[in-house]
Amino acid sequence: GQSLEQPSEVTAVEGAIVQINCTYQTSGFYGLSWYQQHDGGAPTFLSYNALDGLEETGRFSSFLSRSDSYGYLLLQELQMKDSASYFCAVTGGGNKLTFGTGTQLKVEL
Amino acid sequence: GAVVSQHPSWVICKSGTSVKIECRSLDFQATTMFWYRQFPKQSLMLMATSNEGSKATYEQGVEKDKFLINHASLTLSTLTVTSAHPEDSSFYICSARDQGFVAGKQSSYNEQFFGPGTRLTVL
């Protein structure tokens, strides 16, 4: 079966750095993506890792270790608007996305 | 660049009726679209893959006769929830990907573009 585990909730203060972990167990793996979703909205793409290592896009970075079936999303200089749910997702066969359990990030003053 | 729309954005219907949800790629052609369902505070669950010009492929546990999918053109896929019941109330989201160019740039293999979602409430 497919499973992607994330912490259910993370709380951090504005300006801080937070890391959201994702461990996965899937059949078929092309890469790991991260999506942000605000309440009532659609998921928006943040980053993608196909190979091991760190990808940096502005305040967001994503890391992948294929040998460990593990990845994380790193958010720096947290802002209030970053409060949202974050999902990791594995791209498998047929370009299907299997989403993780989701992490609700709360940014406090 | 790459915009996917859904219509309607929300719908309330009586139990037993059918509801059609449209998913359109506005500035690119989508040979493949995906339909997801999301219950409150839960993750997105893939329901089916919609393929232009051929039958949709459904994920295990999704009733194909209840969730009818039609992908009649390269820019439109529809999901019809037949004989809806209160347990079908959910947030339905579509996504699309393109194997070619999106808004003038080579589309990323990994990126799917999501519609804004349709909130279905069945009374």
Image: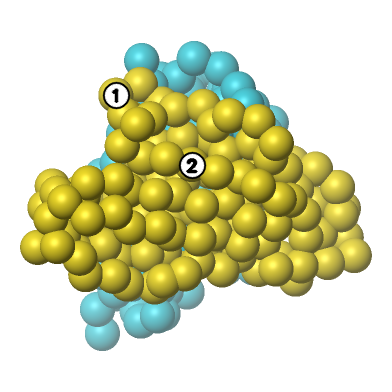
Chain colours: A cyan, B yellow
Depth check: A81 or A58 in front? A81
Give the spatial CA distance, label 2 vs label 1: 15 Å
Residue at coordinates 33% horizontally, 58% vertically from top-left? B19
- Element type at marker 2? strand
Examine the rendering and report whether any part of residue B33 can be seen: no
Q: Quadrant of residue B99?
A: top right
Front-lying residue, B59 or A30: B59
Kindly identify the amino acid type of the residue bearing the numbered disc 2: Ile
Which residue has dot 1 on it?
B61
Residue B47: x and y in percent read 40, 37
Which residue position holds label 2?
B69
Coordinates of residue A17 in the picture (x, y in percent): 41, 64
Label 1: how many residues lie within 10 Å, few (<14), some (14-19) or many (20+)? few
- Where residue A10 sits, quadrant-wise, is bottom left
Q: Measured along the vertical axis of the image, is residue B41 above or below residue A42?
A: above
Q: Is residue B120 left or right of residue A94?
A: left
- Tell me what residue is drawn at x 37 percent, y 65 percent: B118
Q: Tag 1 or tag 2, which sits nearer the N-term?
A: 1
Quarter where residue B4 is shown: bottom right
Q: Chain of mark 1?
A: B
Mark carried by residue A59? none
Which quadrant holds the N terminus of chain A?
top left
Residue B111, above or below B102: above
Total numbered circles: 2
Which SS class for mark 1? loop
Quadrant where the C terminus of chain A sits is: bottom left
Please state if B81 lies on the left or on the right of B6 as rendered: left
Chain containing mark 2:
B
- Where residue B9 sits in the image (x, y, percent)? 39, 73
- Report the amino acid beneath label 1: Gly
